Amino acid sequence: MRKTLYIIGLSAFVFSCAPQKNIKKNTYKPKTPVVQPKTAGNTQTPDKPKPQITNDHGVEFFTTNIADPAKNDNTASYGSIVSAKPAGYKVVKTYFPAVAQNFRQRYLILHYTALPDDKSITVLSQQAVSAHYLVNNMGDNEIYQLVDENKRAYHAGVSSWRNDKNLNDTSIGIEIVNTGYTSDASGKRIFAPFNDDQIKKVSALVKDIVARYQIPATNVLAHSDIAPTRKQDPGPMFPWKKLYDDYQIGMWYDEPVKQNFFALAGTDFAVRYNEPAFIFSIQTMLQKFGYGVDPSGKWDDPTKKTIEAFQYHFRPQNYDGIMDAETWAVLQALNQKYPMK
């Protein structure tokens, strides 16, 4: 018995003293940082000092652009800097601003109210619809601001243009007091004209907003452009060509280019008018320009309303919703001048 216990004890001792290669020790060994010697080739040019944040009675502002305008980046702020205030911590602006940023405001959408002045003010300020600005029809020099430009106004609704949807998120809305339209005995819409003083106000306001936010001409639109199956405003009486000619606002076609396309239409246009392939090509052209129309190969109601909206904006002399040769030529000229990027 003693011999047996002796042998067991000796075996345990030998095992515990033998090297155990498969057992890893979790001993922590701190790494010594390797310091690379500085050489002339490793020296970096220090960043240029950024313009200072201005402080006015405890409110901070940064009104300088240090980003790359070629990339449509802009660090300027047209209002106070809004910052978080986390409990127990301090938010600092040591590295403010980052150069990789741009404006939320990418579109400017024009509307009419279809109401007189007093009701327009009440509806847009007290009900569940709004715009950033309201241009009255009182002959004065006032423009009403209703919503902060940095906030969403409820003016566009279900909307799209080119690759963007829900344009409330990315737009500034301007409502113009105008009674809209009435319908004659045949059902044709008869639109009310705009006051010249109103158009001067609108033009000055749009010019200011477009310049500050670098909004391209292709993004200055009618409500009917971004929601053609639902909306008609600001309608065919709104002088888009005047804004383009006199104030360099928005899009317009070049007349010689339009005439060249009109000459190409010829008699073939009428012959092919009801061919599904031809209709599909028209719908594709409208979609390419920016309208949210689905090509179907049929002259369906959404297509007719989209053509009507296009005519409101670019061919107001005739807004019957029929794609005639002249409307086709205007569309071709615009697609050539303002290709989708």
Image: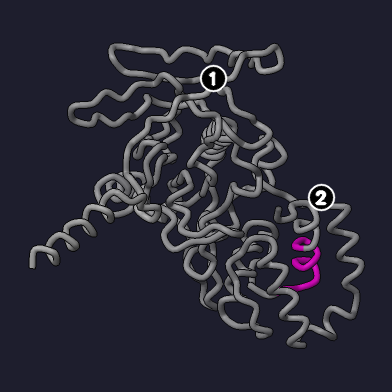
> Are circles 2 and 1 on residues that touch, CB within 8 Å?
no
**Relative to residue 15, is residue 177 depicted above or below?**
above
- Please report the residue visible at 26 percent of the width from the left and 52 percent of the height from the top: 16
Depth order, front residue of 157/185: 157
| Mark 2: amino acid | Asp
**Relative to residue 146, is residue 340 depicted above or below?**
below
Depth order, front residue of 278/133: 278
Select label 2 or label 1 by which is in front. Answer: 1
Secondary structure state at the residue bearing disc 2: loop
Task: Name the residue at the left extreme.
Answer: 1
Depth order, front residue of 78/44: 44
- Please report the residue visible at 51 percent of the width from the left and 70 percent of the height from the top: 229
Q: Position of residue 263 (x, y in %)?
A: 91, 66
- Please report the residue visible at 19 percent of the width from the left and 62 percent of the height from the top: 7
Q: Position of residue 6 (x, y in %)?
A: 15, 59
Q: Say whether residue 237 is magenta.
A: no
Q: Say whether residue 329 is magenta.
A: yes
- Whole-Å distance between the Cαs marked 2 and 1? 65 Å
Q: Position of residue 108 (x, y in %)?
A: 53, 45
Would you name the residue on which mark 2 appears?
254
- Please report the residue visible at 66 percent of the width from the left and 67 percent of the height from the top: 287
The quarter of the rendered structure image containing the N terminus is bottom left
| Image color mode | one colour
Would you name the residue on which mark 1 appears?
35
| Mark 1: amino acid | Val
Side of 296 relative to 53 (left or right): right
Q: Residue 14 bears which disc, if any?
A: none
Side of 105 relative to 145 (left or right): right
Residue stretch rendered in magenta on the structure: 323-331
